[in-house]
Amino acid sequence: MPKTKTINLLPQEEFDVSTLGRILKWAMGTFRIIVIVTEMIVMTAFLSRFWLDAQNSDLNDAIAIKTAQISAQSDFEKQFRILQHKLSIFKTLTDSPQPSGKLNAISSKIPSDVILSGISVGDVSAQLNGVTLSEASIAKLLNGMKNEKSLKTVDLGSLSTSENDAAFTVFSVNIGY
């Protein structure tokens, strides 16, 4: 039987001593450490996936619960918004100057011999149209309204005699409040 020889390309004694041998031995050890660290990182990422999946499932459940709560409260929210809108309309109506208060202040200053033929009431002004037998009644009306604190301006708009009866005086008064 023939004897076989084995050839070792990296001799053991000379390999540790030579520069090339030391570099190769260092590289093999370093690459082994790099492979081990990489495997540890991969295993950590693989195992953390279970924790992240559980956390994601918990968050999805919480979102579903909160969505159900919000949809259950939607009718109440709609009614609440409608009520708020009605209250804001009511507030604007109650905050605006009331013509009835102004009409009370105006009507208390009208002399008994003055007959009103028309009243026009706006948000910031009013106009009175009327007839009387004497111009003194018109002067009394104007003075009474000018002394009223809630009325800002009182002006005589027009003054003329009636077309139907010359004894009557037709007038108009513009009032600002």
Image (cartoon, rainbow, N blue to C red):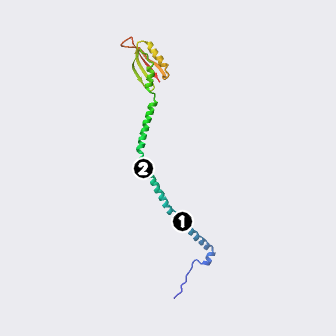
Indicate which label's residue lies in the foreground, 1 or 2.
2
Residue 6: image x %, image y %? 55, 82
Label 2 environment density (alpha carbons within 10 Å; few <14, some 14–19, many ≥20):
few
Residue that mark 1 sits on: 40
Image point (49%, 59%), residue name: 52
Residue 103 on image: x %, y %? 43, 23
Q: Position of residue 50 (x, y in %)?
A: 48, 61
Disc with the residue nearer the chain's start (1 vs 2): 1
Q: Position of residue 99 (x, y in %)?
A: 43, 25
| Neighbours of disc 1 within 10 Å: few (<14), some (14-19), many (20+) | few
Which residue is at the far top? 167
Q: Nearer the viewer, residue 167 or 89?
A: 89
Of residues 161 and 8, the one drawn nearer to the viewer in this rendering:
161
Q: How far apart are the two marked residues, 1 and 2, measured between alpha carbons?
A: 42 Å
Secondary structure of the residue carrying numbered label 1: helix
79 relative to 113, above or below: below
> Hey, what amino acid is under mark 1?
Met
Which residue is identified by label 2? 68
Q: Secondary structure at mark 2?
A: helix
